[in-house]
Amino acid sequence: MNTKTVDAASSEAFVTLPVQPPRAVPETSPLIERLVSVHGATWVDEKTIDAWAAEGGDRVVLFAGDAVQFPEGQDVAVVLPELQRCFPGRFKVAVVPRQIEQDLAKRYGSQRWPTLLFLRDGQYVTTLCGMHDWDEYVQEMARALAMPISRAPTIGIPVVSATASGTSCH
């Protein structure tokens, strides 16, 4: 609806347009929703991730990041089901809701978006960050799925005995 206002002093016509409210940004992108609804990924959060991971086997958790700031996270959401087809029955997938990604990612030492977090039998294995070319992705997935369980980079501080041999800072 356009309205015309005329300024009597200058005889100029101004068109006034209705103000549109800003578009709401969806909390979850359609590609992430599709990963859950069509491809069977599970939503996990700080309260449910441990129980989901403890169900056994290899688990891969997607931290996609903000779809505008990190669009490659959407690419990973599309590629992940294809990677599952390359490794049939080898791993299950979960997705962390965007609103809590930052806090949950810190728990596993992840600071990059997007990130795939690998867990096995409820324990940390590794992370794979960013989007990759297909051949490299397949190779990196195979490597991650073959790795032993390890310690997440932010959990605990390694303790070294005072009598241990090796170099010292003093």
Image (cartoon, rainbow, N blue to C red):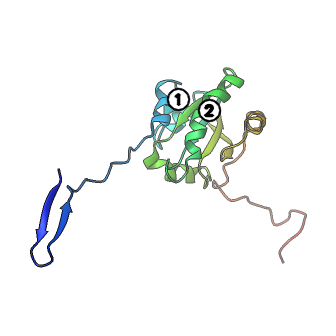
Front label number (2 vs 1): 2
Q: Nearer the viewer, residue 133 or 48?
A: 133
Q: Which residue is mark 2?
A: 80
Residue for point 15% across, 77% down: 10
Q: Amino acid at mark 2?
A: Leu
Local secondary structure at mark 1: loop
Q: Nearer the viewer, residue 98 or 56?
A: 98
Q: Which residue is mark 1?
A: 41
Q: Residue furthest top?
A: 89
Residue 21 x/y as whole percent: 26, 53
Against 61, residue 37 (above or below) is: above
Residue for point 57% across, 36% down: 77
Residue 120 x/y as whole percent: 66, 34
Q: Amino acid at mark 1?
A: Ala
Q: Is residue 98 left or right of residue 78?
A: left
Question: Which quadrant: the C terminus?
Answer: bottom right
Pointer 2 with pointer 1, Cβ within 8 A: yes
The residue carrying pointer 1 sits among few (fewer than 14), some (14 to 19) or many (20 or more) residues within 10 Å by Cα, namely many
- Can I make out residue 155 in this image? yes
Number of callouts: 2
Q: Is residue 3 left or right of residue 121?
A: left
Q: Residue furthest front?
A: 11
Q: Earlier in the sequence, mark 2 or mark 1?
A: 1
Residue 97 x/y as whole percent: 46, 42
Task: Determine the CA span between mark 2 and mark 1.
Answer: 10 Å
- Can I make out residue 148 in this image? no
Against 15, residue 119 (above or below) is: above
Against 157, residue 29 (above or below) is: above
